[in-house]
Image (spheres, helix red, strand yellow):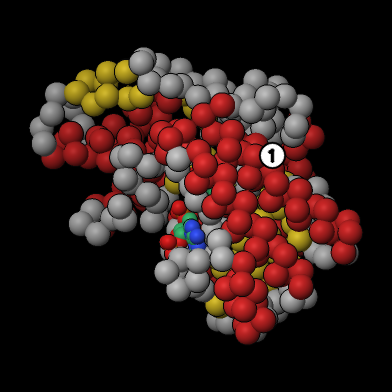
């Protein structure tokens, strides 16, 4: 990827897109094209087509998506399916029509079956029923990676896909109604500390096991794959290490410095019991995550404290 090449980062205001832009700039890429959803609604086919015809990017990181936690995925089911299908179909098809040299599509580890064998290898895709709470989102993401795979097979394009595990970091979504577990817990602990509350409630039993990747590590992996990986098979991106939600909560509690009690609300859904990616394909390509969970949480909380008045809703 030439440092002068024009690179379109779709979703640059988001957690992943923002980290990709930061990392590209750090690595000397200066010809970046970005659009907010207000400037370019990626669900609009003609608008996306016009954008590609005008800008003609050489590389595309497809990090725009409708994203949320269990609650949002479960409530806005139609939107999660429709928006994500439209965004990825429009971008992938226009990228093909306008001879984009390489595109990287971002999926998610929720594409794997609810009761998938662990750790989850890439070839376990479509071997069982999906987790019902995020089935629409997962179906859209599977469609996206299959679009890339089959555009490669039919048209000979170079469109690759990466499936990251749960992410966290700078510029995460801390909205309690619509966020993932790690930022939601960080905000709850912070507010409980500020308000001198006695307890913080954690959704579910605390027993599910999850894996978390610091988003700057993800951005590094994505650029690495963009530069080095040309296969139709998608690649898991994670740390290969797991932690229970209870242990995660205790780690965040310690970083934030909240001295009260944890309460587990078992009336709330747990989601998939265990979710760990097998990252041997990525590791064998020569990439490994660098940031340990505590360090990543400390960096994220430092950013949160600096930006607490301007967090996105
Ligand atoms: N967060 C995670 O834990 C996680 C884990 C695994 C995979 N991923 C994947 O990573 C990708 C990015 O996720 P993220 O966490 O960075 O999400 P995010 O922070 O919510 O950012 C998504 C971005 O997509 C843009 N977007 C949404 N709808 C759009 C539309 N109709 N038109 C144009 N832009 C639109 C938004 O742009 P505006 O801000 O301009 O509205 C937003 O900044 C997704 O594909 C997701 O599946 C995320």
Q: Nearer the viewer, residue 209 or 78?
A: 78
Taking the spot 76% from the left edge, 73% from the top edge, the residue there is 97
x, y percent for residue 206:
41, 20
- In the rendered structure, the answer to whether residue 172 lies left or right of residue 281 reads left
Tell me: residue 313, above or below residue 187: below
Q: Secondary structure at mark 1?
A: loop
Tell me: residue 255, above or below residue 52: above
Taking the spot 40% from the left edge, 29% from the top edge, the residue there is 248
Q: Quadrant of the N terminus?
A: bottom right
Q: Is residue 146 visible?
A: yes
x, y percent for residue 66:
50, 51
Q: Is mark 1 within 8 Å of ligand 1?
A: no
Q: Nearer the viewer, residue 30 or 37?
A: 37
The residue carrying mark 1 is 279
Occupied quadrant, residue 254: top left
Taking the spot 69% from the left edge, 39% from the top edge, the residue there is 279
């Amino acid at each position: 990827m030439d440092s002068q090449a024009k690179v379109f980062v779709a979703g640059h205001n988001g957690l992943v897109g923002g980290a990709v832009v930061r990392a590209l700039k750090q690595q000397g890429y200066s010809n970046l094209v970005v659009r907010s959803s207000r400037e370019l609604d990626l669900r609009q086919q003609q608008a996306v087509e016009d954008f590609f015809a005008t800008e003609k990017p050489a590389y595309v990181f497809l990090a725009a998506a409708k994203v949320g936690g269990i609650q949002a995925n479960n409530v806005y089911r139609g939107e999660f399916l429709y928006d994500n299908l439209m965004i990825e179909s429009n971008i992938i098809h226009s990228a093909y029509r306008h001879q984009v040299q390489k595109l990287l599509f971002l999926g998610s580890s929720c594409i794997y079956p609810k009761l998938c064998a662990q750790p989850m290898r890439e070839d376990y895709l479509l071997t069982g029923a999906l987790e019902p709470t995020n089935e629409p989102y997962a179906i859209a993401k599977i469609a996206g990676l299959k679009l890339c795979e089959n555009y490669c097979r039919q048209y000979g394009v170079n469109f690759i896909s990466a499936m990251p595990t749960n992410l966290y970091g700078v510029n995460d979504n801390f909205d309690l109604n619509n966020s993932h577990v790690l930022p939601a817990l960080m905000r709850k602990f912070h507010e409980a500390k500020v308000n001198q509350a006695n307890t913080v409630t954690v959704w579910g039993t605390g027993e599910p096991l999850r894996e978390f990747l610091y988003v700057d590590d993800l951005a590094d992996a994505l650029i690495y794959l963009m530069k080095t990986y040309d296969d139709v098979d998608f690649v898991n991106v994670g740390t290969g290490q797991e932690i229970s939600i209870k242990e995660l909560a205790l780690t965040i509690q310690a970083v934030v410095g909240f001295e009260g009690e944890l309460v587990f609300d078992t009336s709330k859904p747990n989601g998939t019991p265990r979710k760990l990616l097998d990252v041997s394909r990525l590791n064998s390509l020569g990439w490994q995550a660098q940031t340990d969970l505590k360090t990543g949480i400390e960096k994220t909380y430092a950013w949160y404290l600096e930006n607490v008045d301007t967090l996105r809703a």
